[in-house]
Amino acid sequence: MKIYKLELAGQIKPGQCIPDVFATIHRPLGDDYVNVTLRWADGHEKNHSVQADDAGDLWSMAECLQEILDSHKGTNSMIHDYYRVLQNFAD
């Protein structure tokens, strides 16, 4: 099995129906980079390119995803959950 694209949703805040932020993780066939796009409900978007064979780069992106999607700075085990997701796209 190979995963090419995955959508993640941030936390739903009290009184809201949908999350404030979403993340799309995508690695095109043959590309050396994992592309991560963060999209906020207000239309703001930020793109990241992560080296697919660099564990440090993947961990850094996992830290970013965890803090943005969970709306707080998390523990190593929380970050590791996101790191495992990113590993699906790694070399």
Image: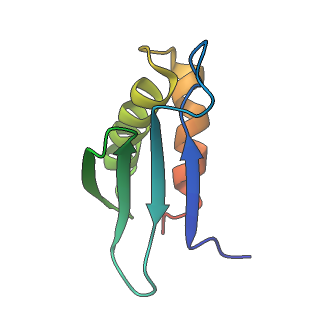
- In this view, the residue in front, 49 or 16, is 16
The residue drawn where x is 49% and y is 63% is 90
Q: In the shown orientation, is residue 78 left or right of residue 69? A: right
Farthest residue, direction bottom: 30
Place of residue 37 in the rendered image (x, y in percent of width and height, measured from the top left): 36, 55
Q: Is residue 11 above or below residue 91?
A: above
Farthest residue, direction right: 1
What is the quadrant of residue 53 in the picture? Answer: bottom left
Place of residue 1 in the rendered image (x, y in percent of width and height, measured from the top left): 74, 76
Place of residue 11 in the rendered image (x, y in percent of width and height, measured from the top left): 57, 25
What is the quadrant of residue 73 in the picture? Answer: top left
Q: Is residue 34 above or below residue 77?
A: below
Place of residue 22 in the rendered image (x, y in percent of width and height, measured from the top left): 48, 44
The residue drawn where x is 63% and y is 29% is 17
**Color encoding of the figure:** rainbow
The residue drawn where x is 63% and y is 70% is 3
Q: In the shown orientation, is residue 72 left or right of residue 57? A: right
Q: Is residue 69 above or below residue 83?
A: above
Q: How many marks?
A: 0
- In this view, the residue in front, 1 or 5, is 5
Q: Is residue 78 above or below residue 91?
A: above
